[in-house]
Image: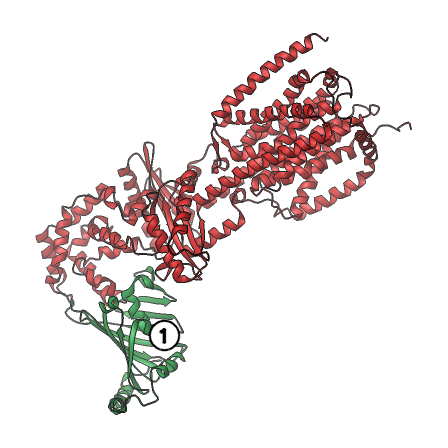
Chain colours: A red, B green
Amino acid sequence: MKSPAPKRGLTAIVIWLALLFACAVIISRSQFTTDLSAFLPRTPTAEQQLLMDQLRDGLVSRLILIGIEGADAPTRARLSREIAQRLRNNPAFVIVNNGEPINTERDRAFLFNNRYLLSPAVTPERFSVDGLHAALSDSIDLLASSSGLLVKSLLPHDPTGEMVQLLDQINNGNHPQLIDGAWASHDGASALMLAQTLASGADIDAQQQAMAAIRLAFNQAPSTTPAAKLAMTGPGVFSALSRDSIKSQVTRLSIISSALIAALLLLVYRSFTALALGLLPVISAALAGIAAVSLGFGVVHGITLGFGTALIGEAVDYSIYLFVQSEHGTNDRQGWIARFWPTIRLGVLTSVFGFAALLLSGFPGLAQLGLYSIAGLMAAAAVTRFVLPGLLPTGFSIHDVSAIGLRLSRLAQRAAALRWGVAALLLIACVILYSHRTTLWNHELASLSPVSASDLALDARLRADMGAPDVRYLVVVSAASRESALGAAERVSMALRPLVEQGVLAGFESPSHYLPSAATQQARQASLPAPAVLQARLQQAIKDLPVRPQLFTPFLNDVAAARSQPLLQPADLQHTSMAMAVDALLIQQDQHWSALLPLAAPDGNNIDATRMRAALKTTGLASALFVDLKVVSNNLYSGYLNEAILLSLGGLVAIVGLLLVALRSPLRLLRIIAPLAAAVLTVTAGLAVFGQQLIILHLVGLLLVVAVGSNYALFFDRRDSNSAMLPRTYASLLFANMTTVAGFGLLAFSSVPVLQALGATVAPGVILALIFSAIFARQPDAPAH
Amino acid sequence: MTKPCFVHVPNSFRSQLLGLMLVTLLSSVSHAADWDIDQLMQSLAQTRSGHASFVEKKSIAMLDKPIESSGELFYSAPDRLEKRTLKPKPETMLLDRGILTIERDRQKHRLQLQDYPELAVFIDSIRGTLAGDRKSLERTYQLSLQGDMQNWMLLLVPIDNKIKKVVQRIHISGVNDDVRSIEVIQTDGDSSLMTIEKSATP
């Protein structure tokens, strides 16, 4: 019996070391991320894909909103100009806007010089006698109107009013007021700027550099004073802040939780050897978990690592059971294995069954947590069972904890008296849950965002002041080439124009407004009559109008030139504000092109999706898609939430099934399930009372409470009423519980909502699971003393 | 309701004559009278809201004959002014705290007045006068007043060179706290004359 054990132990150690090495190699090659990917679906629909693309590198993702607060208005405006000037020389920024008329001249020149290629009103009919007469009458009316002064100088060049058409099309009068020559907020208390980065919002390093450049420009601006404060917000800023906060928290949490658990173990074991050996399963678990996620997903999310720090407190449990439950003073680990391993194995299996459900989630964040937990817990248990016994030095023992065990076992024997109390508590919990049933869950994707409430408030304020684009509604068309994407965008524009007139839409943008397809440009050129023809028609058209034909010589010249001007190319837009729009709205991905047409909803209304889809149908474009990003993102999250609820229930059923098979007794099953169910109900009610709305991670936390709690309940489970629980088993449970609470309790203080939710659920949950397990445990029949 | 025009003509004619006489008289006394810009502004500021009809005649060099438009004006102190043109083509122009909304051909344009300095000088001269906002007027114009309370004429000459390129001068005339006409002479020689007829407050 004695001789094969060390040999087997040696084999186990070799295999273990080889696996650890393999894990280390995998991890060294792993990719880590903190971006939104954990919250986005693995197999997105076309609409979800669009949402993801927009979040990752859409126009909006590249905007940084800058506020300058404090000091006085002239100083703020001066700062704004100084910062803008410096940033405009930085190639990392495509556009820096603070209300200074930087591009206005160039934009107007671009529109004016290319008006006959750009204006949708340029058709053969418009240049017929009747068309010219109508267009000129309109222009003369406009001259008489209040805005006449604006168009007066245009009349000789542009009597048909193409420039007015173009300005109408891109009319976006929604920008901030100017104070001392720079944009300012509604209340005038801060100067505002808008910067667009060259890099996409998903490129967090670049976003961080952009933020640093802005901060530097602010700090080094000649007018800067200590009274002036800089504020920045925007999707890229949020990504960078989130990464910082996840990084710093994961680092801090893992250090504190390791130290805390080590201190706890040292206090119990009073032996550094025991501590070092006890941490081996934990380290193995962490390595196995990260390596498994890396292999399974190709990339490891920071949130998963944060979760991993909490799992330290759970993985350490197995070695606690081994060290504490082994008979004191003997070196016989085989006895522990025979006596306790089946229980622990069942505990590990219940946890694995519970987490396996998460693997099925379409939400990569959840699936990663599931895989990490399964790999980690199995590694920790296997190392404890197969490797650790072989590593224990002869005569290894830990501090005698039987005194604590005895006290605990006496407490536990009296615990049954509290059953009625627990029943009352459960009743209260049910009442609370029932009364909070409508507000229990948070259905918004934003609830997962690691961005703090104060940052979100700043964002909302600057955004409202800025009138910054808040792209919610989009039409997207895809095609094989830029030309056909532009052509498709033009067809969609035609279908949308009547909707604008009917008031279904307030307006829309299209890349084809600034860069029409070559076919359209050619058609517009072909609509322009030859000089002699145009002159004759014009003569006729102005017969009854109060103008003389000589006035329009510039018009005749301009049209003649436009007939043979080269077609607009993307490069022609360079250094105008329209370049930014085309860049953002016309996207190349691999071999295909997408054109985006952002829609503006009528004031205070939503866009009628049915009418939009009907209008798109008339274009005959199969790829034209109307997307309401807010609905998509909320549906996405609701989908996750519903899926997570289903999966959690599935996990629960799997656990119950497993226990039923293993225990072969519904009554024993009930004794194990009852304390877990009670813990889950009580914790959920507690969260509701403290005003925490449940997000997905609370649900995962509840699953963890069941998984961890089932270990406790299994130890309390007895086949018959004669076998009593050993005092040292009580002690081991208490220690295991304390390390778990330490690990997860720390998460509860995290400012990353997903980690906080997990901690706030698991820490109180496992304490309750232990106490309830003791209370509901089968009492030994009439103790004989 | 708008009173028929002819009832007013003799009246205003007489007061105009009287005014002219007074002007000559007063200028010789060199502003000794107690009627000055501040008082005019004060009395104008007392009108918190008003409703009037207008006829505007524009003389533009490019066009062979002047073009006329007419409609209604609504004002409420201090910074809401609506000009509703009915003829020849309906158009609504609303100035509300620096935001100008122009509605025309079912199209609505929101402009920030500050972005359109040419428009801003016009509109602000009307708004500033109606509101009796001397401070705001003096930011852009040099003011001078002629006549008396019964028939005054306020002359606005731009101070800023940029604005001088567009506007040469603006004459605003009125009786008591009623503005009766606004004439804008542009630097390029074009001009517009808006005559205003106060309507009874509805």
User: Which x, y percent locates residue A231?
Assistant: 45, 52
Of the 4 image quadrants, the one containing the N terminus of chain A is top right
Is residue A499 visible from the viewing direction of this image?
Answer: no
**Quadrant in which residue A396 is drawn:** top right
Give the class, few, some or many, for how many residues have Cα within 10 Å of label 1's Cα (few <14, many ≥20).
few
To which residue does mark 1 refer?
A: B135
**Quadrant in which residue B25 is drawn:** bottom left
- Between A243 and B177, the one lying in front of the other is A243
Q: Residue at x 53, y 49 (%)?
A: A453
Of the 4 image quadrants, the one containing the C terminus of chain A is top right
**Quadrant in which residue B68 is drawn:** bottom left
User: Which x, y percent locates residue A603?
Assistant: 42, 57
Q: Residue at x 14, y 53 (%)?
A: A558
* Left or right: A283 in relation to B137: right
User: Which x, y percent locates residue A320?
Assistant: 70, 26
User: Which x, y percent locates residue A277?
Assistant: 66, 23
Residue type highlighted by circle 1: Lys
Q: How many marks?
A: 1
Q: Secondary structure at mark 1?
A: helix
Q: Is residue A24 above or below residue A11?
A: below
Q: Which chain does the numbered disc 1 sit on?
A: B
- Between B158 and A55, the one lying in front of the other is B158
* Left or right: A100 in relation to A211: left
Is residue A433 visible from the viewing direction of this image?
Answer: yes
Q: Residue furthest left?
A: A532
* Left or right: A484 in relation to A16: left
Q: Is residue A305 above or below residue B23?
A: above
